Image (cartoon, grey):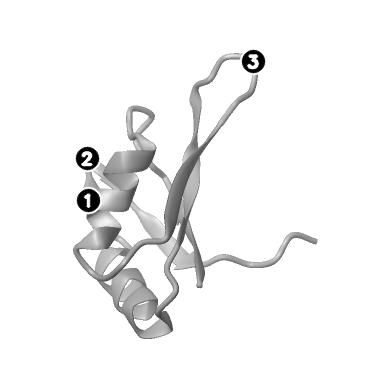
Amino acid sequence: MEIYVGNLPWSVSDQELSDIFNEHGTVDRASVIVERPSGRSKGFGFVTMNNDDEANQAIEALNGSDMNGRPLKVNEARPKE
């Protein structure tokens, strides 16, 4: 399952994003989306978890949780339109 994670602190790395989801199951991939020219975070990212039960547990546990003073927005990613 592909999971959208919004309202990330600007300083969060791919590894830190992966680490918070690893507490709820096995993470296949985690990436913070960055602007190409500056390399600065856009404040959101995506996490891929192959086990849907673990992914749903992570969404439930992390949506609204605090990360460096910011409430995370976590839900199943919608396909690009």
* Element on which disc 1 rests: strand
Sequence order check, earlier mark of 3 and 2? 3
Residues at marks 1 and 2, CA–CA distance in whole angstroms:
6 Å
Query: What amino acid does circle 1 point to?
Result: Asp
Q: Is residue 81 left or right of residue 18?
A: right
Circle 1: is it few (<14), some (14-19), or many (20+) Cα within 10 Å?
A: few
Sequence order check, earlier mark of 1 and 3? 3
Task: Please name the residue shown 44% across and 54% down the image.
Answer: 29
Where is residue 11, by image quadrant? top left
Residues at marks 3 and 2, CA–CA distance in whole angstroms:
27 Å
In this rendering, the answer to whether 46 lies above or below 23 is above
* Element on which disc 3 rests: loop
Task: Please name the residue shown 42% across and 68% down the image.
Answer: 49
Q: Which residue is mark 2?
A: 69
| Number of on-image labels | 3
Circle 3: is it few (<14), some (14-19), or many (20+) Cα within 10 Å?
A: few
On the image, the x and y values in percent for residue 80 come to: 74, 60
Query: What amino acid does circle 3 point to?
Result: Pro
* C-beta proximity under 8 Å, tags 1 and 2: yes
In this rendering, the answer to whether 35 lies above or below 6 is above
Q: Which mark is residue 27?
A: none
In this rendering, the answer to whether 29 lies above or below 33 is below
* C-beta proximity under 8 Å, tags 1 and 3: no
User: In this orientation, which residue lies closer to the viewer: 27 or 61?
Assistant: 27
* Element on which disc 2 rests: loop
Q: Which residue is mark 1?
A: 66
Q: Is residue 42 left or right of residue 14?
A: right
Q: Is residue 61 left or right of residue 74?
A: left
Task: Please name the residue shown 31% across and 67% down the image.
Answer: 26
On the image, the x and y values in percent for residue 3 come to: 48, 64
Q: Which residue is mark 3?
A: 37
